[in-house]
Amino acid sequence: MTDEPLLRVSALSKFYGSRVGCENISFDLWPGEVLAVVGESGSGKTTLLNCLSTRLLPSSGTASYRMRDDQWRELYRMSEAERRFLMRTDWGFVHQNPADGLRMTVSAGANVGERLMAVGDRHYGRIRATAVDWLSRVEIDEDRIDDEPRAFSGGMRQRLQIARNLVTGPRLVFMDEPTGGLDVSVQARLLDLLRGLVTDLGLAAIVVTHDLAVARLLSQRMMVMKDGRVVESGLTDRVLDDPRAPYTQLLVSSILQV
Amino acid sequence: MTDIATYNFAYLDEQTKRMIRRAILKGIAIPGYQVPFASREMPMPYGWGTGGVQVTASIIGPDDVLKVIDQGADDTTNAVSIRAFFKKVANVAVTTETATATIIQTRHRIPEHPLTAGQVLVFQVPIPEPLRFLEPRETETRKMHALEEYGLMHVKLYEDIAKHGRIATTYAYPVKVEGRYVMDPSPTPKFDNPKMHRSPALQLFGAGREKRIYAVPPFTDVVSLDFEDHPFEVQTFDQPCALCGAENVYLDEVILDDHGGHMFVCSDTDHCEKRRSAPPSPLWGGRAEGAGGRDLATTLATPSSALRADPPRMGEGKEAE
């Protein structure tokens, strides 16, 4: 890890008219670090994630990203072409619903290969070999490479979406409830896979989740949000084991024990 | 002709023609870029060439000689009626000869006879957006064109190879124009794609229903997209035209009877007729022997039993697979 962060966010706010999406959010994210953003529905987690990934433009505040050449660029001042290029090379975005992040009408191989073709790879054999490699890394059988994601189960789709995002070797991945809508055993497998990939590749990630177990397993640091504001942040284990803010205490004590 | 005296020359009013000419000029200035235009209702249904007709009506003058082809043929319904239309509303000379025409309106083919400088080829285009079936949102495809994000086009070719072992797209094969815009060459067979590359003729594309005009100016690079390890290839036929014996031309399959009898003939009727009416030349060859030289009427009149005596293999002459 270097001494410099990868992403610097300061005083980020997003308002929908007079309603608050998220307000006055500041944090730094270091390379290889996984930050979990937790909170209940409507607390502004997804708004924050969409602002950071430039899918939404914030009402005020700044976010700077350290590019691969170590140049700092302010995200909201970049041209759309640059932002879209960043999105498909150095970044990844894993949607809660895999159908949003995949092309459901083309094969799994093409889904994985799309980013490669988008950055100019024009060799079919190489693209396919990379796709095979990535499918095996996310535990999808090689003989499913020509199947459309429509024929995949929910867990497989989510794994395919992850492969599709990681194929260009991004440094930062945004995840919006990556395990939402999956049953617990599939969730456990996916989390295990994600944890392995994040560690192996040294990915930095911002994971939005309402599931504290996901935060505990994946992240080193977490932010707790309520009503668009950060109520508490710190090391994941510290926040979960010794919650300070009343809302965090409520959240932690709300976990059902089996 | 008093009954059409109320129509302006070439049907469209002058304001409309100016609007369309502006779109054409913009299209020529930005090769391959789809220029929106206010497409008019034409006295024919969408899909019958309303875009091409509007482009032709806007550029045609009294001295022009018009040729109209439909799938290469001058004698099909669409070609005949559009030709009759312009004869009536513009009183222009019409021809079936590629070489003497100044404007050639076409549906799905580029003539075999090489085009020359000064000629204009007008394509009728059903769906101008090459990315349409991959990305349904128009806002998104326009952004992709603007930002030159064409990775998706290769996704389609990738799918072809993954499914069929080769690039199975045979018509509307995407091309890159002058190294910038990816363009749909209209549903011409990919056989004709190389003819577009650095063609001395001006090529205009009109999509009436979709309200888009685009253009390829003369001597512009038109390169078919492909993969390094799966290069672009045109269709090849393993037998010559059954009527004129031409090789290296695009052939249509003609069904002769209901016993599997069929033959392959030139899709370009003008090219085929020219070759059959000309005196035999050693350059052309093959005309005197075999099926060459036999005209269509004779072939069709031949009893089907005679044809069945030596039935051609099904699929013979189809594209090389």
Image (tube, coloured by chain):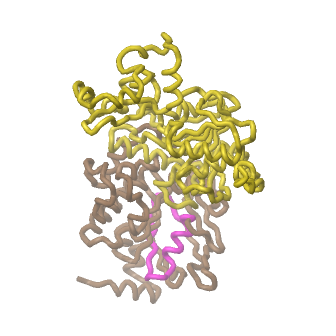
Chain colours: A brown, B yellow
Locate residue B170, reporting x and y percent. 43, 39
**In the image, B244: left or right of A59?**
left
Quadrant in the picture for residue B285: top left
> Residue drawn 35% across and 69% down?
A179
Relative to A127, residue B3 above or below? below
**Image quarter hosting the C terminus of chain B:** top left
Residue at far top of view: B282
Relative to B252, residue B306 above or below? above
Q: How many numbered marks appear? A: 0
Locate residue B104, reporting x and y percent. 62, 37
Residue at far front of view: B2
The reply to whether the magenta stretch includes residue A224 is no
Q: Out of B94 and B236, give the one closest to the viewer.
A: B94
Locate residue B147, reporting x and y percent. 61, 51
> Residue drawn 40% across and 42% down?
A127
> Residue drawn 41% across and 57% down?
A103
Q: Out of A9 and A134, give the one closest to the viewer.
A: A134
Locate residue B180, reporting x and y percent. 62, 42
Quadrant in the picture for residue A193: bottom left
Q: Out of B146 and B269, give the one closest to the viewer.
A: B269
Relative to B278, residue A203 above or below? below
Residue A5 visible in rendering: no
The reply to whether the magenta stretch includes residue A36 is yes
Segment colored magenta: A29-54
Residue B214 visible in rendering: yes
> Residue drawn 56% across and 48% down?
B125
**In the image, A246: left or right of A108?**
right
Quadrant in the picture for residue B42: bottom right
**In the image, A252: left or right of B190?**
left
